[in-house]
Image: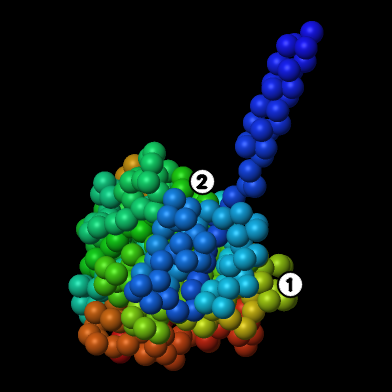
Amino acid sequence: MKKFFMLLTVFAAFFVFSVTAFAQEAKETYLVKFEERSDFTTYSSFGIASEEIGHEFETVDMVEAELTEDKVSELENHPNVSYVEKDIPVYAYQQDVPYGIDKVQAPLAHQNGDKGAGVKLAVIDTGIDADHEDLDVHGGYSVFTSGVDADPYYDGSGHGTHVAGTAAALDNNVGVVGVAPEADLYAVKVLNSSGSGSSSGVVQGVEWAVQNGMDVINMSLGSSAHSQAIQDVVDAAYYEHDILVVAAAGNEGNASGTGDTVGYPAQYDSAFAVAATDENNQRASFSSTGPAVDISAPGVNILSTVPGNGYSSLNGTSMASPHVAGAGAVIRSSFPGTGAAEVRSLMQGASKYIGSDTNWYGSGLLQINSAVN
């Protein structure tokens, strides 16, 4: 009986130990931005273990890390940590169902030889079907490391391929023609096959675009939540590396067109925010509104490329944004050396008046040929 009691005591002790060992605090993904960190400072000095780091950024002094709530609290109080931000979801801005190359004067610009030749245009999205007969993809990158989404040229959603076609479908007598058919197109995959991603993935995608010398970035994606990490890298791309960053305003508008509903990153000054219009140059009912809107482009019933050598029409500010990104490529090709800020100014100065409400239309409807002439 005594031996049995001792055995039971040992077993109970082991059980308590096992429960304690497995009851570790849960970890979540965070972005940690440092104020300053010398070459001799290690992440371990901040209490971040090497195995907790998912990605180390170079464009901004930041890491993606798996952290406990206690560690987050500790880092937030560290004098050399700027902020600790939870990795948030981002989504493709798409409705269900688009058209508008004529509306933005692209054919007139093409007649004058203005087609975006030699300009690097990155579509930061769900990937691009590089086998499509109407697209010439020069390179790419995926933030995903396993499964089909690790391939930037696999687009399980179709969203990125559609966006790419509006921006740069070839002028080859097949299917459709894009705004900048001679631009060098790059697939930067930050959203998976269901159109979802994360702020850390977007930061990685923009960083890749910076490091690989892109001239124009299209971001037909966003979130209703502000991400300081995304703002920092978009600011760096635009202000420090002179990249034209074009972003969809979002599809959170209401029928009356009231309120400030523009999403992020379109809300940031460093991003050129694009609202959507229809065939009658009227605001699309879904198009987000607010003072951050910079310009408008067609975004209703837009016909463009989809995976498998197909073509389809979609609605959304996602479809409006690549009209402007393509226009940016055309202008930068026609006027080599023109800065990103000047490209924005040219597009806004040449835009067509379609209504007095700048919260709806920004400067007006994009007019590419007027901008390059």
Residue 203 on image: x %, y %? 44, 65
Q: Quadrant of the C terminus?
A: bottom left
Residue 85 higher or lower than 259, as above or below = above
Residue 124 on image: x %, y %? 40, 62
Residue 216 on image: x %, y %? 34, 73
Front residue (pair 103, 233): 233
Instruction: Tell me the residue at 46%/62% (across/down).
Output: 44
Instruction: Tell me the residue at 52%/86% (across/down).
Output: 363
Q: Secondary structure at mark 2?
A: loop
Q: Quadrant of residue 18?
A: top right
Residue 129 higher or lower than 99, as above or below = above
Front residue (pair 117, 270): 270
Using a 10 Å C-alpha cutoff, classify the residue at mark 2 as few (fewer than 14 neighbours), some (14 to 19) or many (20 or more).
some
Q: Amino acid at mark 2?
A: Ser
Q: Is residue 356 left or right of residue 301?
A: right
Q: How many numbered marks are there?
A: 2
Using a 10 Å C-alpha cutoff, classify the residue at mark 1 as few (fewer than 14 neighbours), some (14 to 19) or many (20 or more).
few
Q: Secondary structure at mark 1?
A: loop
Q: Is residue 31 visible?
A: yes
Q: Is residue 252 left or right of residue 184?
A: right
Q: What's the image's color scheme?
A: rainbow
Residue 139 higher or lower than 358, as above or below = above
Q: Amino acid at mark 1?
A: Ser
Q: Which mark is residue 274?
A: none
Q: Which mark is residue 256?
A: 1
Instruction: Tell me the residue at 57%/55% (across/down).
Output: 67
Instruction: Tell me the residue at 59%/52% (across/down).
Output: 28
Q: Quadrant of the N terminus?
A: top right
What residue occupies the far front of the structure in this picture? 2
Residue at the spot of label 2: 194
Closer to us: mark 2 or mark 1?
2
